[in-house]
Image: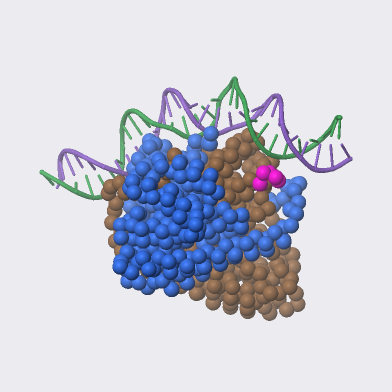
Chain colours: A brown, B blue, C green, D purple
Amino acid sequence: MGVQTIDRAVAILHWLGNSGEQGMRLVELQRALGLKRPTVHRILSSLMEHGLVSNDSRTHLYRLGWEAAVLGWSSVPVGFDLRETAQGAMSRLAEETGATVVLCACSRRETVCIDRKAGSYPIKVFTVEVGTRRPLGVGAGSIAALAALPEEEADAVIKGLMEPLQSYPEALRRSIVPSVRLARKTGFAVSDGLVLPTVIGVGVALRDPRGVPIGTLGIASFKDSASDKRISDYAQLLLREQAKIERAFRDKMMARAKTQALAPRPAAVRHAAPANR
Amino acid sequence: MGVQTIDRAVAILHWLGNSGEQGMRLVELQRALGLKRPTVHRILSSLMEHGLVSNDSRTHLYRLGWEAAVLGWSSVPVGFDLRETAQGAMSRLAEETGATVVLCACSRRETVCIDRKAGSYPIKVFTVEVGTRRPLGVGAGSIAALAALPEEEADAVIKGLMEPLQSYPEALRRSIVPSVRLARKTGFAVSDGLVLPTVIGVGVALRDPRGVPIGTLGIASFKDSASDKRISDYAQLLLREQAKIERAFRDKMMARAKTQALAPRPAAVRHAAPANR
DNA sequence: CCTGATCGTCCATTATGCGGACTGTTGCTG
DNA sequence: CAGCAACAGTCCGCATAATGGACGATCAGG
């Protein structure tokens, strides 16, 4: 259906994003993708030529390259800048709770961690790095995102999720449906030790002006005797920030609609720019 | 040399980034790339499946998609977040000067506008949109970036630049070498009406801790009787912010070096993540 | 200095992507 | 509103571009 080479290249970019600063070796990628080594190597080389992938020549580790970031930045006006918009919220939450705040973007049937801020509390909970991809359903924010989908769509997604969730514990899988149901009522989700034992997560979905979940905001903290009490506090704070962020999106969209108004359909050749091949 | 399909896909992504919110039609892309329509269409479809490209079904305009932004965000820890780091600088400059502040990232032999802030001055100078790609040499910041390269390398780059600069005025091309020479002395560059008549730009390069230029910061304003005087004021402000930003990069790098220290070479299989294909 | 792991390259084979030709759609014009 | 022009999208036979088996290079550890 798609173009084979592009499918493979994108898969590589996803894996490399997921590996973050750590990076990945050629064989790891090879095994992850189930392709022959020369194939992976050739695609990597091509991506490197374009700067989308970089390679530490000492360790032979492959990572996402500078051009991946540039591409993202240059696409930001098209979507909205989730990362920038959530900056304030993340600082406030980290400050007020002392816990770890995590911002993820929804990417198809996965969430990708795109920012993280640690509060002052001495025990830091770093369950995910920036770049980490996890299937929907893993983590509190993820559950909240599912709950933000229209019920039918959510059911369909959950059904398709069972396979990628194979590598996660049975308990997590079984908890998804009830958790989502609960989250639909309360507006937030809780993950109590399901992803990592003794870690509690609370999360909300971030929706664009049409109501479609585009990201998640979550707080992760260590489980102790007082954590049950904290959950509802965290949830209140998250809901407050969720409202602020979603309002910011709405405002941005309004501002844009004004300038664009009835966008005329184009007709002729315009710019004469990129020096690209 | 590269993989044909990837080269083409990346070229498409660059063109679409360059077209910004406006977007591009299939035929435009076709002509820009010099490929047959079915080929462009097939690659676009594949990129759309991955969410890297979106298509307004009403107008048939193609734009960069949400996943392009996600990819960028998830790669940010690897490079540094130029956009976020420069936020403060941009606000201050827009505030203090009232003019338009432009932030670009260096992308091979081009610069890409990644952020823009308009000051309060009623005549807004919007020469570039976020996403716009221009060859190095076009714009003040661009000249400053060339000046930040080692002299030999700059010469080589400038030589290779003459072809992509074909579509720009003769005067601009002839001014590059002397402008760069001057910028090497003063630390900033000026573009007086070369890109767009009656628009003056002042710019500085933003260098990573190794001294390599990774971006540019510039101020664009309307040319009037007082603009000659303003240039040096703008330059001072830009140099101040340049220092702040580059210091921030150094600090981030130091902080990172501590946590990583002697990064051990990896050995075994690690995560079992992406649900990709 | 050998062993076992990985990285990178070559090149014959063939699957994969290419693009000419056709169909469907939209919007203008007489 | 028929007729035209310009564009979007699809099909399928052909040939080119990507594939992957095999080889050599490099490096860490014993």
Is there any visible trace of residue A213 in the rendered image? no
Left or right, A217 with reference to B58: right
Is there any visible trace of residue B30 in the rendered image? yes
Residue at coordinates 45% horizontally, 41% vertically from top-left?
Answer: B159
Q: Main secondary structure of the magenta part?
A: loop
Query: Which quadrant of the figure has residue B44?
Result: top left
Question: In this view of the protein, which residue sits in the foreground, A129 or B164?
Answer: B164
Q: Quadrant of the C terminus of chain A?
A: top left
B4 w.r.t. B102: above or below: above
Q: Give residue A252's position: percent from left, percent from top.
A: 42, 68
Query: Which quadrant of the figure has residue A189?
Result: bottom right
Residue at coordinates 66% horizontally, 73% vertically from top-left?
Answer: A119
> Is B245 covered by the magenta stretch?
no
Q: Give residue D9's position: percent from left, percent from top.
A: 37, 42
Residue stretch rendered in magenta on the structure: A56-60
Q: Give residue A179's position: percent from left, percent from top.
A: 62, 66
Residue at coordinates 55% horizontally, 57% vertically from top-left?
Answer: B207
Left or right, B248 with reference to B157: right
Question: In this view of the protein, which residue sits in the foreground, A49 or A85?
Answer: A49
Residue at coordinates 35% horizontally, 40% vertically from top-left?
Answer: B31
